[in-house]
Image (cartoon, grey):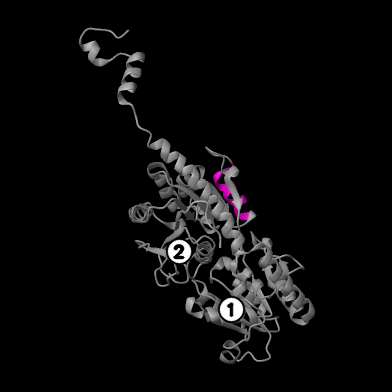
Amino acid sequence: MRASKVAMKILMLLKYPLFGSGSGTYVRKLSEKLKILYPDDQLAIFCPDLKNKINGINLYYYKMPFHAASTGHPDWPDAKLYSNLSRQNIDELYIESFNQIIKVVNDFKPDVIHVHHALYFSWIANYLSSIYGIFYVVTTHGTELLTASENKSWIPLTRDALCRASMITAVSGDTKKWLLRIYGRYGQHGIINKMRIIPGGVDYESYSRLEPIKIINKKYNLGGKRVVIFSGKLTYKKGVQYLIKAALKIKAEIFIIGGGEEESKLKALVDELKVKNVHFMGYFGANDDKELKEFYRRADVLVFPSIWEEPLGLVALEAMASSTPVVASKKGGIPLAVKNNVNGFLVRARSAKAIAEKVNFLLKNEDIRKKMGEEARKIVEEKFNWTKIAQRFHEYYEHAFRTSQERLKRMKLPVDIEQERIEIKGSRLDLKEIQNGNRIR
């Protein structure tokens, strides 16, 4: 527990639920850790999810006019993609969000705002900084960069907001490079100069290889079987189709945990290939947390076969925290966590052959698998520790708060109207004097 140099009120803006998305988990865990470390601070989250409360943290409900996502969301099968929104859609989304956030700001009265995803919430934060004097931090999680890459209309206002942010963080080095490619390195105030890399973390204390398996062995008849898992959204970019193709050669039972728009296609592929060792588990929500953690512990290998520039992948970190080695595509920010031949293997994306080869190697070599699992846990403890991550963010909040207080003082300086009138008269003609036929000297 640490005391803040000054007690602050911190508001986080999140366009996804706190459960069911990587950024939601990020915000939830960060908030929980901040509350423990800095109990004098007050925290609030504005998000489209009030089903699950967080002790000591204010939740404000974001009533979206319609569901929207960058790459789909398992809880929102009707979600429109941000990159495909019409001008009218964007108008409605922005205006509704603006009105709701203004009400939250006037109710909670934050000292600092933390915007998650560099998209339309950052536009609103830019306005609040100008009019209310509240400084803000922006975190890019990566998926919104895909939106900006596919639809350039999101770029101008977001670039302005990034230029005026107090600090910008990215969840991986690859995500940072991606943002700079889209928005430029400098801008009005030098975007690159205010960028830092802060990855997601894991509460590794809540993950353990040693805890007994109480549920899934019996429920899914796993006794004595080799187990390989995938966990995440079932979207095309996650590359699950290549794991299914690799399953023909993998000597283990493969459990696919998650839901999404590709689920029916993936099941059809299993039927087409006549694969017998692939099992679809569906989406695991907050109520399935115990089962999910048991799958991480029970698994011999987690496969992470993404085919796009994955920002980082909290799923891989959760498996690693459970001392489970990972076989993953060498894409995006994944190599920040998965070190080839250390805590798992990095393979070429879209290669079912490479996936099968490395998974089978780990299944056959128990000593190597165990050693890699130990290294996976060690990397999580050293580099992906929520305590360290929360402390870094808090330093940025304090910086934003100090600079916003200085700006507020300047905004509230009294204006000597009479003196300004004299100065104006000293430099140019006064209309009343002209009307009287006199000239100011």
**Residue at the spot 24% in from the left edge and 7% down from the top edge:** 438
The dominant secondary structure in magenta is helix
For marks 1 and 2, the one nearer the N-term is 2
**Residue at the spot 55% in from the left edge and 55% down from the top edge:** 393
Left or right: where 355 falls relative to 155: right
Q: Which residues are magenta?
A: 174-185
Instruction: From the viewer's side, name the closer residue of 363 and 1.
Output: 1
Residue 365 appears in the figure: no
How many residues crowd mark 2 within 10 Å: few (<14), some (14–19), many (20+)?
A: many
Judging by the rendered image, the residue that carries numbered circle 2 is 16
Judging by the rendered image, the residue that carries numbered circle 1 is 293
Residue 410 appears in the figure: yes
Give me the C-alpha separation between circle 1 and circle 2: 22 Å
Name the kind of residue labelled 1 in the image.
Answer: Lys
**Rendered-image quadrant of the C terminus:** top left
**Residue at the spot 71% in from the left edge and 66% down from the top edge:** 346
Determine whether the residue tagged by mark 1 lies in a helix, strand or loop: helix
